[in-house]
Image (tube, grey):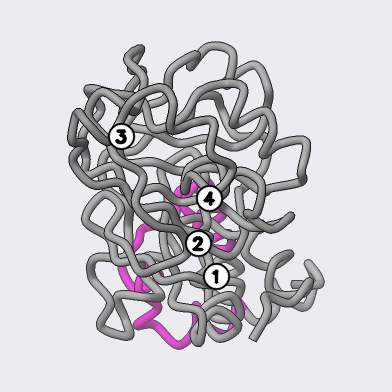
């Protein structure tokens, strides 16, 4: 089922921390992509369905510059076929010694309306990518071409990225804290629950900043706090 506009909007308004907790409540522990960072401070959360690219270790006789002349090369094909609104997620084997992509390819993704790009490796031209403004997450900058270490092998298949399982169509959310993967069939429910959790956390934050103790408030073991939260929601239209 495609990601709905309502669910996309809800996910843009909640944090990856809240989403991680909602997933943990359902038994999902490893949905956060580890050791990736945004190239620039996100203006808003990155949200989109996963379109994947998998790299394997390069073999020298198969990984020459000539391979880029082939329009069916998986890296080139992924850049031209990743759907608008999707997130290109690259399995680079957590190896940032060679780039997963550079500014020209990421620029092409941006112009095609892709929602963002994630790799557990590195990007070359990282300053240029940061200036583009498209949400982009990587481990660290890396100058060498991907051909030196990575062989692009296939697209839109299940991958591992930063130790997280990513299936095509899973919903990817990224913010200043990192990137999380929501199994596609749970996206609507997780978005709804995280929206509710965010309302309560905003209420708690307000009360803590007023000097309130967290005892009985977070978690809400005191029924009086739940009644106060209900009144707060009504007043705030939340």
In this figure, which residue is indicated by the disc labeled 2? 204
Q: Secondary structure at mark 1?
A: helix
Which label sits on residue 214? Answer: none
Q: Residue 144 is drawn in which quadrant?
A: top left
In this figure, which residue is indicated by the disc labeled 3? 121
Residue for point 59% across, 37% down: 135
Q: x, y percentage for residue 215?
A: 31, 67
In this figure, which residue is indicated by the disc labeled 4? 88
Give the CA separation, mark 4 to mark 2.
36 Å
Q: Residues within 10 Å of mark 3 (few under 14, many from 20)?
A: many
> Magenta region: which residues?
202-229
Q: x, y percentage for residue 40?
A: 55, 24
Give the CA separation, mark 2 to mark 3.
38 Å
Q: Residues within 10 Å of mark 1 (few under 14, many from 20)?
A: many
Residue for point 32% across, 62% down: 159
Give the CA separation, mark 3 to mark 1.
36 Å
Which mark is in front, 3 or 1? 3
Give the CA separation, mark 1 to mark 2.
6 Å
Which mark is in front, 2 or 3? 3
| 170 or 102: nearer the viewer | 102
Q: Secondary structure at mark 3?
A: loop
Which mark is in front, 1 or 2? 1
Q: Sequence order check: which comes first, mark 2 or mark 3? A: 3
């Amino acid at each position: 089922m495609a990601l709905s506009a309502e669910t996309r909007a809800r996910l843009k308004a909640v944090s990856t921390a809240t989403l991680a907790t909602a997933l943990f409540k359902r038994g999902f522990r490893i949905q956060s992509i580890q050791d990736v960072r945004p190239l620039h401070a996100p203006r808003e959360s990155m949200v989109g369905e996963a379109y994947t690219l998998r790299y394997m270790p390069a073999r020298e006789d198969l990984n020459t510059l000539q391979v880029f002349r082939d329009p069916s090369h998986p890296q080139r094909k992924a850049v031209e076929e990743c759907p608008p609104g999707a997130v290109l997620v690259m399995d680079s084997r957590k190896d940032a010694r060679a780039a997963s992509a550079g500014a020209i390819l990421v620029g092409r993704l941006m112009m095609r309306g892709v929602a963002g790009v994630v790799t557990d490796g590195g990007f070359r031209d990282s300053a240029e990518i940061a200036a583009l403004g498209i949400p982009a997450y990587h481990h660290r900058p890396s100058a060498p071409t991907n051909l030196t270490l990575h062989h692009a092998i296939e697209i839109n298949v299940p991958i591992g990225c930063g130790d997280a399982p990513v299936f095509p169509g899973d919903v990817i959310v990224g913010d200043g804290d990192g990137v999380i993967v929501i199994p596609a069939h749970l996206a609507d429910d997780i978005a709804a629950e995280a929206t509710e959790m965010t309302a309560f956390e905003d209420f708690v934050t307000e009360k803590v900043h007023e000097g309130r103790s967290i005892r009985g408030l977070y978690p809400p073991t005191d029924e009086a706090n739940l009644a106060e939260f209900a009144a707060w929601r009504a007043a705030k239209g939340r």
